[in-house]
Image: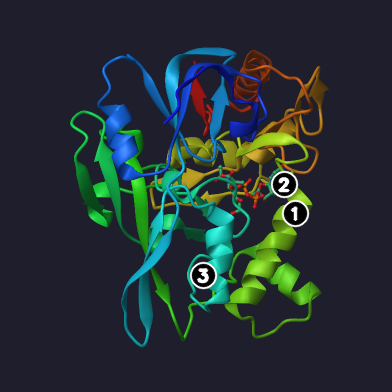
């Protein structure tokens, strides 16, 4: 294990921010991870996986630990289902494609999401009507405090909308080393209910879609709406869709009858932040090298040399504008690392 000093993180975050880490190390086994976590020479340790959900400031006085554990293993199987343990450093989309190649169903609606498998449970990633929790069985994680390897069940993880135990009580306490998923092997549940998927399937003249067809449709939609981080630095949705109480929603809907919304429960409604931001006139706008994507206002982009501060300034400008126009608070979905 080599600990690098003053290391550029430009290639380790999908925003492409040229931040400098005081220290950086790559771990390829659980033992190496336990070793470095137990090392008292470094006061502050930050875990980095695919770097797809973080906004880095420009210099960070910490040891970055890049989790690069690889491998997939079938741990149990019946005629109908199969449980697969996937190591944290496996790229999410490659893993989804591998599952589809085996005709394992469940994650196809989440094709083309950037990032690694091990960080996916932290914010319970989701897209097009499906969330990670729908296929999740358990995960293994190393405790940062005592380096013990523990298993967390689905219940332990307390998944919610872009939320889990790892963002609350478990914050900065564990490093996920593997995730176990349950896939269907036959009679797959096809989730084509999400509007954009239906339209895409119609466009492709597919009436009885397979899991691979769903994946292809999702890939086509994502490619048309979301920028490829390899071409234009970004972190996917920068903001969460705000969830508001019924009373506030009613008032909002009265003033904005054309606004899209989802009913979360009898008491709560979710409003797409992308719509709110677009109404404030930010869609496609550029401020220096920081900007708002032209096809999806929820996504902030780095045109080339934006700093973490440039992106953050733009985010604050957007939050203020939405608050002023709609009296609704939106908040970042990405982790801000200072
Ligand atoms: N909308 C606008 N303007 C925009 C963007 C969206 O008016 O610039 C409207 C759309 O017309 C639509 C509604 O907002 O009526 C919802 O848009 P969309 O279906 O694109 O989904 P979203 O709510 O904006 C969420 C996720 C995405 C995920 C999509 C599809 C969050 C924070 N984001 O976006 O996740 O791909 O649904 O399921 O929940 C990510 O987390 O990085 C991500 C891309």
Q: Of 33 and 182, which appears nearest the observer?
A: 33
The residue positioned 36% from the left and 35% from the top of the image is 167
Q: Nearer the viewer, residue 201 or 26?
A: 26
SS state under label 2:
loop
Cα separation, mark 2 vs mark 1, equals 6 Å
Q: Residue at x 71, y 33 (%)?
A: 233
Asked whether disc 3 touches disc 2, contact meaning CB atoms under 8 Å apart, the reply is: no
- The residue indicated by pointer 2 is 226
N-terminal-most mark, 3 or 2? 3
> In the depicted view, which residue is nearer to us: 233 or 276?
233
Q: Which percent across, then down, holds residue 151?
A: 22, 51
The circle on residue 223 is 1
Q: Dot 2: few (<14), some (14–19), or many (≥20) neighbours within 10 Å? A: some
The residue singled out by tag 3 in the image is: 99
In the rendered image, residue 225, in percent from the top left (x then y), is placed at 75, 49
Res 134 quadrant in image: bottom left
Q: Quadrant of residue 207?
A: bottom right
Q: Quadrant of the N terminus?
A: top left
* Cα distance in 3D space between marks 1 and 3: 21 Å
The residue carrying mark 2 has its beta carbon less than 8 Å from ligand 1: yes
Residue 243: x %, y % from top left: 47, 40
Local secondary structure at mark 3 = helix
Q: Is residue 264 left or right of residue 166?
A: right
């Amino acid at each position: 294990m080599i600990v690098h000093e003053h290391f550029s993180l430009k290639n380790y975050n999908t925003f492409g921010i040229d931040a400098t880490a005081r220290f950086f190390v790559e771990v390829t086994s659980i033992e190496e991870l336990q070793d470095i976590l137990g090392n008292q020479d470094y006061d502050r340790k930050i875990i980095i996986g695919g770097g797809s959900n973080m906004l880095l400031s420009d210099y960070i006085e910490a040891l970055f630990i890049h989790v690069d554990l690889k491998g997939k293993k079938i741990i149990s199987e019946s005629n109908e289902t199969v449980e697969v343990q996937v190591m944290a450093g496996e790229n999410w989309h490659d893993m989804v494609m591998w599952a589809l190649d085996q005709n394992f169903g469940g994650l196809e609606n989440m094709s083309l999401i950037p990032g690694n498998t091990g960080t996916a449970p932290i914010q319970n990633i989701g897209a097009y009507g499906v969330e990670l929790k729908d296929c999740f069985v358990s995960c293994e994680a190393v405790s940062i405090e005592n380096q013990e390897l523990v298993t967390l069940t689905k219940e332990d993880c307390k998944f919610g909308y872009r939320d889990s135990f790892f963002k609350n009580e478990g914050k900065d306490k564990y490093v996920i080393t593997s995730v176990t998923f349950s896939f269907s092997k036959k009679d797959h549940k096809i989730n084509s209910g999400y509007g954009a998927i239906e339209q895409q399937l119609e466009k492709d003249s597919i009436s009885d879609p397979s899991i691979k067809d769903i994946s292809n449709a999702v890939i086509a939609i994502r490619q048309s709406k979301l920028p490829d981080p390899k071409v234009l630095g970004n972190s996917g949705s920068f903001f969460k869709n705000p969830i508001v109480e019924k009373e506030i929603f009613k008032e909002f809907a009265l003033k904005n009858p054309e606004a899209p919304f989802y009913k979360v429960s009898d008491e709560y409604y979710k409003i797409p932040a992308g719509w709110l931001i677009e109404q404030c006139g930010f869609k496609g706008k550029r401020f220096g090298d920081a900007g708002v994507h032209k096809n999806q206002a929820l996504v902030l982009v780095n045109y080339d040399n934006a700093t973490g501060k440039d992106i953050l300034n733009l985010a604050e400008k957007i939050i203020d504008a939405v608050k002023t126009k709609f009296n609704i608070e939106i908040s970042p979905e990405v982790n801000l690392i200072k």
